[in-house]
Amino acid sequence: MLVHICCSVDSHYFLQKLQADYPDEKLTGFFYDPNIHPYSEYYLRLLDVRRSCKMLGIDLIEGEYDVENWLEAIRGLEHEPEKGARCSVCFDRRFEITAKKASELGESVFTSTLLTSPKKSLRQLQHAGDTLAEKFGIEFIAPDYRKASGTQEQNILAKEDALYRQDYCGCLFGLTMQREQQQKLADELFVPLSGQIQPESIEERVEMYEERWQLEEQDIPYRIVKQRFLNWRLKTGLLRVRKQVVAAHFLPYSTLKGEYSRGKIEYTTGDLHHMNRDEVKFITLETYNRLVESCYNTVIELIFSPPPFEKELQIRTQLGMSPYDLSAILVVEEIPSNKIEILCQSEVYSDVREILIRTS
Ligand code: SF4
């Protein structure tokens, strides 16, 4: 039996139920989910599915991440709500490729872990599966493992086995709508040009779950715990001096009361050069290099290859400022002498992230 897999939380429970209900059937997992955006999230879900399949002794095949074809298939349906027409096309496409794969592999039955998701309509999934089963001359099974206390059992299992629990269905459009409804920043979509790993970003989660994999391989005990913290994202940072754009690196937690400020340097304390408006401060690249123990030759070099976020976090206290200070601090090669304009579009917000701790 070929089992289409969407994520570990759904598959871990579903596969165990299938193993119990079809003891003579050899199950093969098929991770085909080009709907998942961005790619880092796709990779993270795949990583956890690999772990789950390994725990259950199930072979896993990775399908193609053919996101362009998926986007083409749902064209015109981008603004549909969840469980609407876009989702039908999305299921159809994933089911079709799974049915095709099953037929290529000589399997006679296929199914999908999407059937366990409480966010999906069973009727919609059953219809999609049955239509394709007919087309490929194979059988589609749709066991209802949600009924009775199925969903509850699934959640308990996910917690016990510390599975990665995503908080959006998968695609860019569903994610954007969900975050709009929650009035929450879609920070999953922020990837700085520098590649610096941001707190509670998908990239940070990938690092953590890869480390978890290593710990399990070495039999080292660990726990994944939640941490509430103040997060920050820079959307735009721009410095103009006498109307000319000048390279500037904005330190983490730089904010402005509005998004725009202008002024001139008024006074200096130690390494800090203070602008006369909005508590904006400047430091030189030389100071930055000394504090971070780096050797950047230019600010552009720093912008495109900064040190880890945590290292930059220490700079405010190293400069004698409060760690709660949210003023904009810009790193420049030369302290501007006149007519400074700054655009700083950033957000500071309460957030929760998972962290890995080693236990004994
Ligand atoms: S919301 Fe989920 S099911 Fe619907 S189109 Fe997006 S990824 Fe597919």
Image (tube, rainbow, N blue to C red):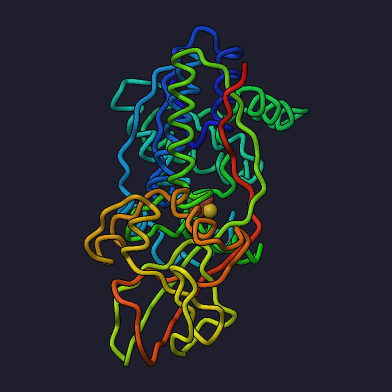
Q: Quadrant of residue 26?
A: top left
Q: Residue furthest left?
A: 297
Closest to the observer: 278 or 231? 278
| Residue 254 visible, this orientation | yes
Residue extending farthest top: 24
**Residue 110 at least partly seen:** no
Q: Is residue 108 toward the left or the right of residue 20 in the image?
A: left
> In x, y percent, where is residue 178?
60, 60
The residue at the point 49 percent across, 73 percent down is 269
Residue 357, horizontal then vertical, whole percent: 58, 29
Q: Where does residue 297 sit, x and y in percent of width and height?
A: 22, 61
Please determine whether, in this image, residue 169 is positioned above or below residue 107: below
Q: Position of residue 255 (x, y in %)?
A: 54, 72
Q: Residue furthest right?
A: 148
Which residue is at a point 38% across and 30% down the rendered structure image?
137
- Residue 161 figure quarter: top right
Q: Quadrant of the C terminus?
A: top right
